[in-house]
Amino acid sequence: MKKLLIASALLASATTALAESTPIVGNVQTRCLITTDTNGVFGNPLPSKLSTASGDGGVVPVVRYDVTLADAYLAKVTTPTAFSLSPSLSDSVTWTGSTQVSKTSDAAMSGYEAAKITYGSTTQFDLTKAGSTWFSSTATAVYGVSKSFPGGSYTAIVLAECIAK
Amino acid sequence: MIMLVVALLAIYATNAHSEYLYGLTGNMAGTGHTWGMNIGPSGSQSLKINGVFYQYTPVKNTEDDMVVHVRNKRFGTNEYIFSSTDDWSGLPGGIPITKGFVIDNLPIELWGDGSIDVEGSGSVVDANVVYSYKYNNDCLTPMSDPSCSGYTDAVLAMMGNTKIEAYDPLSDENIADLIDEKAELDEEVQQEDEEKVKAKDKLQRMLSGVNDSILYANVTSQNLLMFAMSRSNNLNPYYDKRLAGGEYKETVALNDGKLPDNKKGARVGLAQQLLHTEMVNAQYNQED
């Protein structure tokens, strides 16, 4: 009697379950981590100029790339071409900027600087070694033709990206 | 009074729990490329190095070979307890390198002098070497722990000029005599105990023999009793047997009433007799 009941129960479940979806899940651990090492600060050496250069009273922003897989990523650092936050501006702003390797965790990374590629405001580095690399970016904004910036708070963004090769 | 002070200090010391404090050195390579390892607060106990961080900028031509070692000797030896090497050969200089290492809490006593050594063409500028360490500050006050150096001096200083002589109880004659007496007494007690054990063992063996005899006698008497009881049971069935019908009648009959001589048997018997006679006579007719 017991066997009959089990058999009929199995039969019922077999007839009701016609299909089943089985999910496949997985996690990919990041092997390229970007961290802001130093927040940048604009100095204001002239009424028409904002600059991150230390000589201009600014602080150069530094981002750190931690790569655990060698020769797998490109580091792209783009200096700002506009303010993300500023008072209303009635004239154009001329931007200049550059990005350099400021520090490495491996002697072999010292070649990154010489091998970098610059296009527009973006600088690209080939991260051929595993380890940490610090990139510093300078940014300078000049308002109009020797025109004073309006008073207020100014914020610009340096974009750091890690692109898989 | 002295004992009380020492006991109180001991109790205080056992109740004081150790708690590690952490710190960082300054730039050990700030004044040169070699440095000693006199780090941490004075009086700190169990100072252990748990990290090394360094940074420097190599100055060199790209085509030159240059190897930089940042290292510490193992104290008292020519081996290195920490060593990190950067090979700049064929690489451009000018870009600072920074490295950090986690050290497995190696005691400061193992760490000898540190250095930045350059092999090949080039130099190192803006060197910065920092050690992180941990320690406990139990011995910042020497009396906090009897294991701290200066503990005894601190206790004596606290007690003033009281003259204290170390007392060795084993050198006291009275105590030595007591110890000897106790040893003799212990020996006597031990001998008495051994004799008691022997007597007890002997008594047990005797009792064990008596018990065996009684047991054997009991077994024997029981066997005899069982034999006597079973004998009547075994013999009585034979006394009670009866012949079926009361008699056995003759069943063999001689048909003609005559029983003839067995001539064949007589011949065999005669032949046997003759052979016997011949054999007997042969004993007397032997020729020497």
Image (tube, rainbow, N blue to C red):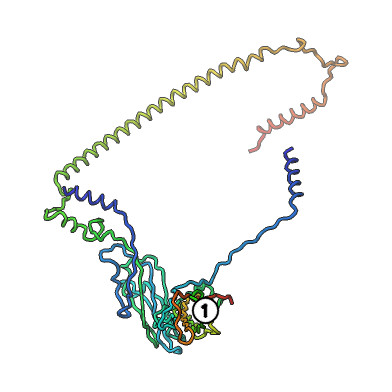
The structure residue drawn at horizontal position 68% and vertical position 33%, both measured from the top left corner, is: B282
Q: Is residue A57 above or below residue A5?
A: below
Viewer-proximal residue among B218 and B199: B199
Name which quarter of the figure residue A105 lies in. Answer: bottom left
Residue at the (26%, 49%) spot, across then down = B11
Amino acid at pointer 1: Ala
Letter of the chain that mark 1 sits on in the rendering: A
Q: Quadrant of the C terminus of chain B?
A: top right
Q: Which residue is mark 1?
A: A82
Specify whether B197 is left or right of A44: left
Image x and y of residue B142, in percent:
23, 59
Instruction: Name the quadrant containing residue B56.
Output: bottom left
Q: Nearer the viewer, residue B208 or A69?
A: A69
Residue A20 shows up from this direction:
yes
Secondary structure at numbered mark 1: loop
From the viewer's perspective, is B89 left or right of B276?
A: left
